């Protein structure tokens, strides 16, 4: 499941280019290379040639790949942009409309309907915005670009296989700029592995059939390691005297152990037996959540901490949870300041990934380590004070 919004996050953690993945150079020569490689993927030369005959490089795809400013927003701002009463109302309406489909998904895969509803909402606004980029052009353009060829090149051959089956038209198939298709925006390889005929018409139509899209999404979550019928996150309250260095996804305790340290659920009771991590998206003075094993499944297709938490939180809202307690978060850093901080952390030997102004997992870990070294509350939230002291 790769959403229209999720696709824009693929650029946030670019993978290193592997020496054995061809990219760049003449576009026509690149296409010739794809044709030559196709038989190694059990795709005959004629099928590959027909698939690629209409493919063109799309500069708009590369422009979209570079437009990532919204993802520099902190959790509170970001979640408020994505979550609205209208989306909640329509989500609950869709839950009733497709109640039978969700019953099947919960029975077969153990995936809560609200998790899928949240994905459906954020990815395509319940199917309304599925993207209008030519999918074949997008995949080949991104594979030709040398930022992440190892991610996109295999998707081209998966699309060729779908084409050979009659389930993909390189001229007319459209979707998100990063090659995802349909209501839950699945990449071609995902479709091959998890595409499911939910409405029983003999076809997997992810663009026009909500039952197909939802069943396929449920199957994919299951394949990614979703633990049936378990929670994903709970909002919690944390005492002021807490040892903030215990926060972060690197530390796990059972809900019962967290309770012994003074953590309580804001709504209902804690999942006492499941392992969980305390996450503080904007530090010790902002919202707080316990994240269970299913929360980590979100990262199987997306490395954006803020987006993943927003999607997980929205699923709890759809299931009836209240609005999170914003608290009084300390002032954060601007994009420019964040880049300065990342550069300083990198100079001190930390691996923060790209100097991109985005507070990702690696930057959070480095921030927490420096807070410990400096004797500051180690809540992984970077502040102007931390920037000035490093």
Image: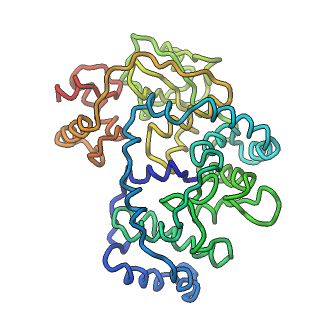
Spot occupied by residue 306 in the image (x, y as percentages of width and height): 45, 37
Spot occupied by residue 6 in the image (x, y as percentages of width and height): 50, 49
Spot occupied by residue 61 in the image (x, y as percentages of width and height): 43, 62
**Quarter holding residue 70:** top left
* Placement of 101 over or under 86, stated as above or below: below
Query: What residue is shown at x 38% (from left), y 20% (from top)?
Result: 329
Spot occupied by residue 313 in the image (x, y as percentages of width and height): 56, 31
Q: Nearer the viewer, residue 264 or 189?
A: 189
Q: Nearer the viewer, residue 365 or 322?
A: 322
Query: What residue is shown at x 39% (from left), y 35% (from top)?
Result: 73
Query: What residue is shown at x 55% (from left), y 57% (from top)?
Result: 131
Q: Nearer the viewer, residue 382 or 209?
A: 209
* Placement of 366 over or under 109, stated as above or below: above
Image quarter where the C terminus lies is: top left
* Placement of 72 over or under 139, stated as above or below: above
**Quarter holding residue 365:** top left
Q: Nearer the viewer, residue 295 or 103?
A: 103
In the image, 114: left or right of 342?
right
* Colour setting: rainbow
Query: What residue is shown at x 44% (from left), y 30% (from top)?
Result: 77
């Amino acid at each position: 499941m790769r959403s229209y919004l999720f696709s824009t996050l693929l650029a946030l953690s670019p993978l290193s280019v592997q020496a054995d993945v061809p990219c760049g150079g003449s576009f026509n020569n690149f296409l010739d290379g794809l044709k030559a490689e196709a038989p190694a993927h059990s795709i005959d030369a004629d099928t590959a040639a027909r698939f690629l005959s209409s493919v063109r490089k799309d500069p708009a795809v590369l422009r979209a790949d570079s437009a990532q400013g919204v993802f520099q927003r902190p959790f509170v701002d970001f979640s408020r942009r994505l979550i609205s009463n209208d989306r909640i109302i329509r989500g609950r309406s869709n839950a009733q409309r497709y109640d039978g489909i969700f019953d099947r998904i919960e029975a077969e895969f153990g995936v809560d309907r609200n998790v899928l509803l949240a994905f459906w909402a954020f990815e395509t606004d319940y199917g309304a915005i599925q993207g209008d980029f030519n999918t074949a052009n997008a995949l080949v353009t991104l594979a030709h670009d040398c930022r992440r060829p190892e991610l996109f090149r295999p998707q081209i051959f998966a699309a060729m296989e779908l084409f050979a089956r009659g389930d993909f038209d390189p001229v007319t198939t459209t979707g998100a700029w990063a090659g995802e298709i349909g209501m839950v925006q699945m990449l071609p390889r995902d479709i091959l592995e998890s595409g499911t005929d939910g409405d029983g018409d003999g076809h997997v139509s992810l663009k026009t059939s909500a039952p197909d899209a939802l069943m396929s999404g449920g199957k994919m979550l299951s394949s990614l390691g979703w633990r049936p019928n378990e929670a994903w996150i709970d909002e919690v309250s944390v005492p002021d005297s807490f040892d903030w260095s215990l926060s972060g996804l690197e530390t796990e305790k059972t809900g019962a152990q967290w309770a012994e340290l003074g953590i309580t659920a804001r709504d209902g009771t804690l999942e006492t037996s499941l392992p969980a991590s305390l996450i503080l998206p904007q530090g010790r003075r902002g919202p707080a959540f316990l994240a269970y094993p299913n929360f980590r499944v979100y990262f199987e297709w997306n490395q954006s901490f803020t987006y993943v938490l927003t999607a997980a939180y929205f699923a709890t809202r759809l299931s009836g949870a209240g609005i999170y307690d914003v608290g009084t978060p300390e002032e954060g850093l601007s994009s420019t300041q964040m880049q300065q901080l990342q550069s300083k952390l990198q100079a001190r030997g930390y691996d923060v990934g790209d100097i991109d102004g985005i507070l990702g997992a690696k930057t959070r870990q480095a921030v927490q380590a420096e807070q410990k070294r400096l004797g500051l509350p180690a809540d992984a939230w970077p502040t102007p004070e931390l920037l000035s002291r490093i």
